[in-house]
Amino acid sequence: MSILYIFLGFVLLVVGGEFLVRSSVAISFKLNLSRMVIGLTVVSFATSAPELLVSLQAALNGFSDISLGNVIGSNIANIGLVLGITAIISPLMVDRDFYRFNWPIMMIFSIVLYFFLSSELVLSRIEGLALFLGIALYLILLIRRARKKPDVQTEEVDPSLMRTSNFKVIIWLLIGGGALYGGSELLVTGAVDLASRLGVSERVISVTMIAVGTSVPELAASVIAALKQEKAISLGNLIGSNIFNIASVLGITAMIQPIAVVSTATLTSDIFWMLGVSFILIPLAFLPKKFMVGRIKGLVLFVGYVIFVSLAFIN
C-alpha cells in the first residue's frame, strides 16, 4: 500500500500543481500584471507548491527529515539528474547571467542554509523569515534585470489564460488546492510506511524517491524538448528552481513550523552533496570548452547522482 500511496501522491501533486499554476496565472492577468512579472514570480511560486505542501505536511506531522530531504534531494536531482540527462541528450549553452547572477545567489542561499541548520540543528521561524525575505529581494533584482534586458528568460506563460472566466479560475483553484493537499498527505504517509518496511530512515526515502518524484515533471519536459532538438532547458530557470526550493519552500515551512535536523547525515552528507554539485557547475561551464555543458559533462553529473543515491541507501 505504501507504494500505491506514494504513486497516487505524486499523481495528485502533478495534477494539483498544474491547476494551481493555471489559476494563479489567470488571476495575475486579471490583476493586470505583465507576462514578464508573472513568469518571474507567480509561476515560480506556483511550481514550487508541490514541494512546499510536502515539506509543510511532513514538518507538521513531526517528520522533519522529509521536509529537509525533499528540498536538498530535489536540488541535487535538478542538477545531477535533470541537467545531467538533458545534457547527455542535447548539449546546453551557458549564458553569462548564469555565472554572473543566478549561480552566485544559489550558492549564497545554499551556504546560508548550511549555517542556519548547523548552528542549532533547527531551522527556526526567524531563519525561515530571513530566507523568505531573501527570495523577495532576489525577485526584485530579477524583475529589474529583466526590464533592463528584455532577452532575460522567464518561465513560460500561456497568453490564452488571459480570457479565463472567474468560474473556471475558482474551480481550478479548488481542484489544485485539494489535489495538492491530498497528494502531500498520501506521499508523506506512504514515504514513512515504506521507510519502516525497508528498514531505512525517512531521510533516505525523501532525499531519493520523493526528490526524484518532485523532479519528474521538469525532467520529462526537458527530455522531450531535447529529443525534439529544441532548446531543452534554461540553466537560469533550473538554478532559480533550486533557489526557490531553499528560500520559499523551507522559508515558508519554517515560519509555520520550525524544522529540526533529526538525522546527522543531513549535515554530514546530503547538504555537502548539494553544495558540491552546485559548485561543480562553474568548472563544468568553463572547462574544457567554454559556455557549453556537453554530453561528457552531463554524464559526469548523472554518474555523480547515481553514486549519491547508492551511498544514501548503502549507508
Image (cartoon, rainbow, N blue to C red):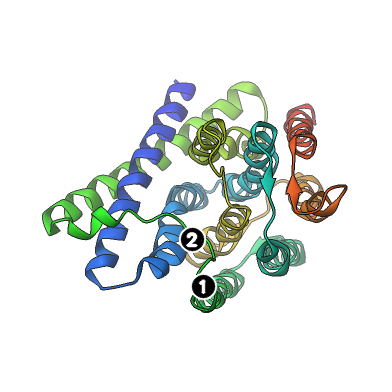
Where is residue 299 drawn, in percent x and y? 76, 33
Q: Circle 2 — which element?
A: loop
For the point 34% across and 44% down, which residue is it?
16
Mark 1 or mark 2, which has the lower sequence index? 1
Left or right: 309, with 182 as reference point: right
Q: Quadrant of residue 130?
A: bottom right
For the point 67% across and 45% down, which residue is it?
92
Q: Circle 1 — which element?
A: helix
Q: Please state, as top left, top right, bottom left or bottom right, where the N terminus lies in the image.
A: top left
Q: Quadrant of residue 34?
A: bottom left
As drawn, the label of residue 154 is 2
Instruction: Give the residue type that dot 2 points to.
Output: Thr
**Which residue is more in the foreground, 280 or 225?**
225
For the point 37% across and 46% down, which residue is it?
17
Q: Which residue is mark 1?
A: 146
As drawn, the label of residue 169 is none
Asked if the residue under mark 2 is in contact with the one under mark 1, i.e. CB atoms within 8 Å, the reply is yes
**Which residue is more in the foreground, 92 or 250?**
92
Total marks in image: 2
Where is residue 102 drawn, in percent x and y? 65, 64
Where is residue 137 drawn, in percent x and y? 56, 77
> Cα distance, mark 1 to mark 2?
9 Å
**Which residue is more in the foreground, 311 or 172?**
172
Where is residue 96 drawn, in percent x and y? 70, 64
Circle 1 packing at 10 Å, graded few (<14), some (14-19), many (20+), is: some
Circle 2 packing at 10 Å, graded few (<14), some (14-19), many (20+), is: many
